[in-house]
Amino acid sequence: MNIVVLLKQTFDTEEKIVLENGAIAEDGVKFVVNPYDEYAVEEAIRLRDEHGGSVTVVSVGPDRAAEALRTALAMGADEAVLISGEPLSGDEYAVALALHAFLKAHTYDFIIGGNFSVDNGAGQVAIRLAQLLNLPHVGSITKLTIADGKASAERDAEGDLETVEVPLPALFTAQQGLNEPRYPSLQGIMKAKKKPFRQLSVEDLGLDVPAPRTERTALSLPPERNAGKLIAGEPAEQAAELVKLLHSEAKIV
């Protein structure tokens, strides 16, 4: 069974966000594997161990994303691929095109990634890629079973639980609760140094990346919250004063 994992390197969720000239300052910042992608890596390794085959981890990003890919190799993935290039500047449409250009020339039984990335939170790459590859897509899965060329997945559906069965190949995205990701062992870290690691460019893929479909025009921290107010008086007086404040200060009524 050939399994492909989509992986992104993101800000450590414990890092403090600092803005400089309208952009997030990255100097000295710790980057990690996107937490939701960790669930995808763990599930791929688990299914590989159960059914045999290999796990290939693929990332689209800058050169520093190699560190996240090596973490996945240390967890137990078999090989890694980094696709990089200036045209792939974070626009999720362009990222999906790059992944499609790579995967259309390869065979796989299923693809899995995180439900979304904790930096952008858009959740667009996987579903765009599924459309480009003409694959069934099941998002936010919390359980996955493979048997007889089919996959049965349980998924989070707005607080409810939904069971979906699809033929393979298919594409899935992992939600918290799917598994408990393992930590890379010292032995795994040493083995990772000898595993295949390829770095490809846009030119290597023969990809003509179009203009981004989305663009970040401004980025700012939210305004500081003002101290709360206590409204005195009888209930009717409090309600009248609240409406007045919502109109004159909060500007929402």
Image (spheres, rainbow, N blue to C red):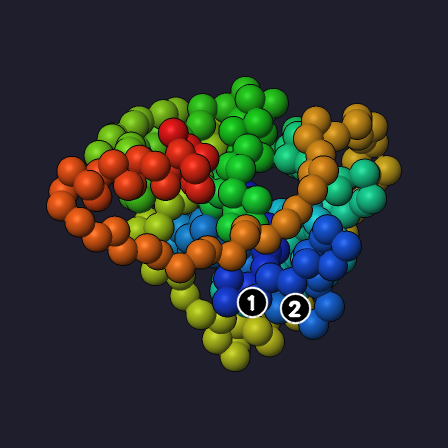
For this rendering, which residue is in front, 142 or 76? 142
Residue at the limit of the structure toward the bottom, as seen here? 186
Q: Which residue has dot 1 on it? A: 15
Residue at 62% over, 69% down: 30
For this rendering, which residue is in front, 124 or 195? 124
Residue at 51% over, 62% down: 13
Left or right: residue 171 versus residue 216 is left
Which amino acid type is shown beneath numbered disc 1?
Glu
Left or right: residue 171 versus residue 29 is left
Q: Is residue 179 above or below residue 218?
A: below
Is residue 34 visible from the viewing direction of this image?
yes
Left or right: residue 169 versus residue 212 is left
Left or right: residue 236 versus residue 165 is left
Q: Quadrant of residue 105?
A: top right
Quarter of the rendering occupied by the C terminus: top left
Which amino acid type is shown beneath numbered disc 2?
Val
Q: Quadrant of residue 249?
A: top left
Residue at 71% over, 34% down: 215
Where is residue 80? Give x, y as percent: 64, 54
Label 2 near label 1: C-beta < 8 Å? Answer: yes
For this rendering, which residue is in front, 62 or 121? 121
Residue at the limit of the structure toward the right, as seen here? 203
Q: Which residue has dot 2 on it? A: 29
Where is residue 135? Give x, y as percent: 50, 24
Where is residue 82? Give x, y as percent: 71, 50
Name which of mark 1 and mark 2 comes first in the sequence: 1
Residue at 46% over, 55% down: 225
**Label 2 secondary element:** loop
Say the numbered circle drawn on residue 232. none
